[in-house]
Image (spheres, helix red, strand yellow):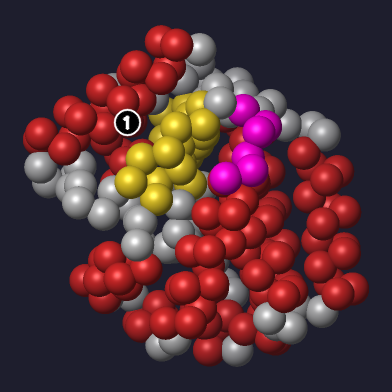
């Protein structure tokens, strides 16, 4: 199981699709059928807890299914999800009580999942992430202030600087377009292949 993590707009789904072409079964992030996501961006305080519990439940379901697949790849996971909850709690958009319930639920779930064979963290600057978010054009992402994306990027970097649950590969993607550029695609796949061979 390969897990891809990184901030919004970094290219997790694109890389998942590239890796899926190498014979991996993809497990997509539950964005499309999410009844809370667009509401959350307009009223974070009201919807932060139900959104995080929705994601947690779906990611738990994904990771359980992935363990029964020979080669699985997912564009987000139960691990990185905790970053969002912590950030919402720090900004008082999720109450301490809600955060405690969320954390206990997460810990219970983590006792029942297999760690990834490889965690891939896609690192990106805030400016580049915002450029990609604007290009993607999801309405509810456009209303978010720069400060939110800056905090998110900081929390991601902190989390993955200290991540030790499985092997990790960090790739800076500021100047990479592995979706459209064959050279960039070959470069990234080469890094992943090299890392997997070393495990």
Whole-percent x, y for residue 37 in the image: 54, 73
Whole-percent x, y for residue 73 in the image: 45, 32
Whole-percent x, y for residue 112 in the image: 79, 32
Q: Quadrant of residue 190?
A: top left
Q: Does 163 lie within the magenta span?
A: yes
| Residue 151 shows in this picture | yes
Q: Dot 1 corresponds to which residue?
A: 19
Q: Does 137 lie within the magenta span?
A: no
In the shown orientation, is residue 126 left or right of residue 29? left
| Whether residue 31 is situated above or below residue 140 in the rendered picture | above
Question: Are there few (<14), some (14-19), or many (20+) residues within 10 Å of tag 1?
Answer: many
**Front-most of residues 16 and 93:** 93
- What is the magenta range? 161-166
In the shown orientation, is residue 126 left or right of residue 157? left
**Residue at image x 25%, y 71%?**
131
Q: Secondary structure at mark 1?
A: helix
């Amino acid at each position: 199981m390969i897990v891809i993590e990184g901030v919004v707009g970094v290219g997790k789904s694109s890389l998942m699709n590239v890796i899926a072409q190498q014979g991996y079964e993809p497990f997509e992030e539950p964005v499309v059928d999410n009844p809370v996501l667009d509401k959350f961006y307009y009223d974070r305080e009201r919807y932060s807890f139900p959104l995080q519990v929705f994601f947690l439940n779906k990611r738990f379901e994904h990771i359980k299914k992935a363990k029964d697949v020979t080669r699985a790849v997912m564009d987000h996971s139960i691990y990185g999800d905790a970053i969002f909850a912590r950030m919402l709690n720090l900004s008082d958009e999720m109450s301490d009580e809600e955060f405690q319930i969320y954390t206990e639920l997460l810990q219970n779930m983590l006792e029942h999942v297999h760690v990834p064979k490889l965690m891939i963290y896609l690192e990106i600057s805030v400016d580049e992430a915002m450029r990609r978010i604007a290009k993607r054009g999801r309405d509810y992402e456009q209303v978010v202030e720069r400060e939110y994306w800056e905090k998110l990027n900081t929390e991601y970097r902190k989390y993955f600087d200290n991540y030790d649950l499985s092997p990790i590969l960090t790739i800076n993607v500021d100047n990479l377009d592995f979706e459209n550029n064959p050279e960039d695609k070959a470069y990234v796949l080469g890094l992943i292949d090299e890392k997997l061979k070393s495990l």
